[in-house]
Image: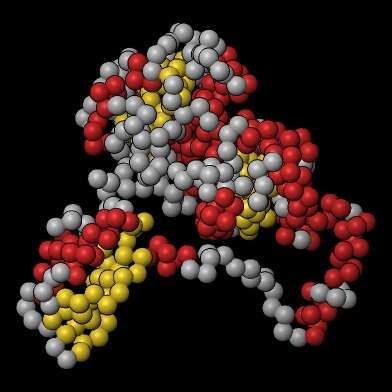
Amino acid sequence: MAHPSAQFSATLRVHLANRPGAFAALAAAVAQHHALLDAIDLVRVENGTKVRDVTVLASDAEHIERIVATVREVDGVFVEHVSDRTFLLHLGGKLEVVPKLPIKTRDDLSMAYTPGVARVSRAIADDPSKVWSLTIKHNTVAVVSDGSAVLGLGDVGPEAALPVMEGKAALFKEFAGIDAFPICLATRDPEEIVRTVEAVAPVFGGVNLEDIGSPRCFEIERQLRERLDIPVFHDDQHGTAIVVLAGLLNALRVVDKTLAEVRIVITGIGAAGISVTKMLLAAGASDVVGCDVHGVVALDYPGLDDVKREYAKLTNPRAVTGTANDALEGADVFIGVSAPGAVTADAIRTMAPDAIVFAMANPNPEVLPEEIEGDVAVIATGRSDYPNQINNVLAFPGVFRGLLDAKAREIRIDMLLKAAEAIALVVKDDELNPNFIIPSVFNTDVPKAVAAAIRGAE
């Protein structure tokens, strides 16, 4: 079972009999399901009862239901209602538009809007470069998705993608002061997506592509880069690759190995896996073997599409064959951007001494850390409830902060490499250890360091 966490937390409004042991019985019911008690608040005292809000942390939605069912059976406890804290947080959405200046008087109105705004529009028409200083463009990013590859949910559509893109926009603001806005498109046609983004691009200083299925995402990104004069960043590719490289650089420091010498196995040859591979090769890796659900991707692999054929040309220098489990024998590094069960714990144990495992499938990793603890030197996942979370939040806010500050027109591989190095260096030598190879997403030095690296590369 996964660790209880805030993502599956609920607040129970309970009426407790005002007698010794009543709350202890409730707590025992929660403990029976290996859940965690969090906040406990007294709401009011009534005749013979105390009304409390009791927050519990669970492992999944079904876990919450089992906990509540057991609590309802406790003598002296009445459950008035149950609130899912995650759903409460999302009520009404997570974003709003707030003006930077008050409009309280006729003078304010005449300058912010008509007639005064016409002078500003004329100035931009005469000199289009002034759009960067006189509008929101200089600090605004479009977060674009078609909802076809959302987190671990897959193809859920643009409406269901909206909460994720709202969250992305909130992270842009919180960690880099950037005004981002979700644009969820009701089309899967690459050309239509490209035309739509091209049409709205005058408003934005950059484009963040998000959760668009492979291989369409590659063509969409390529066309937008050709057509637009603002940077286009596909976070599933570039953000993941930056943070994986940052974590791996530090993990290699822990085990005293170099990127050039290690053997690397990757599962998941989609947008993230391909970009991670290209980033590692650009950083100096020489031996990368990629695997999909059928096994090692090689040039003689049946049914290769153009994307995987190109991938096969770049990888597998030792002509490894077989399954992902087979490929792990003697490998130094495993990087999973695939699905739970992509490799087995037994296969992990066949890796070289001081192995490094990045099992990043969400919400459940390719192999659970508990299954291989003590068998490898460093373990990282995509989850916040384990050490060493590989989280794109470490990359994209600082990357766009640097791009916008520099008024960059494109994103280059050297920028991504500099960003990864900047993240890695935030972890100081005296802090580095197997359980701390990557800084916290709440470390305010990270976006500053990444932005500075991007500006320096530009």
- Report x, y in % for residue 34: 18, 54
Quadrant for residue 308, please give it: top right
Above or below, 241 against 347 in this view is below
Residue in front for this viewpoint, 374 or 271: 271
Q: Quadrant of the N terminus?
A: top left
Q: How is the image coloured?
A: secondary structure
Above or below, 69 against 408 in this view is below
| Residue that appears at 53% across and 49% down | 156
Quadrant for residue 369, please give it: top left
Q: Quadrant of the C terminus?
A: top right
- Report x, y in % for residue 245: 48, 31
Above or below, 395 against 277 in this view is below
Q: How many marks?
A: 0
| Residue that appears at 45% across and 43% down | 152
Q: Given the current orientation, which residue lies at the most extreme top position?
A: 318
Residue in front for this viewpoint, 417 or 389: 389
Does residue 234 show up? yes
| Residue that appears at 93% across and 56% down | 126
Does residue 180 show up? no
Above or below, 274 against 81 in this view is above
| Residue that appears at 15% across and 69% down | 73
Q: Given the current orientation, which residue lies at the most extreme left position?
A: 20
Q: Is residue 293 left or right of residue 242?
A: left
- Report x, y in % for residue 374: 21, 30
- Report x, y in % for residue 272: 52, 33
Quadrant for residue 8, please give it: bottom left
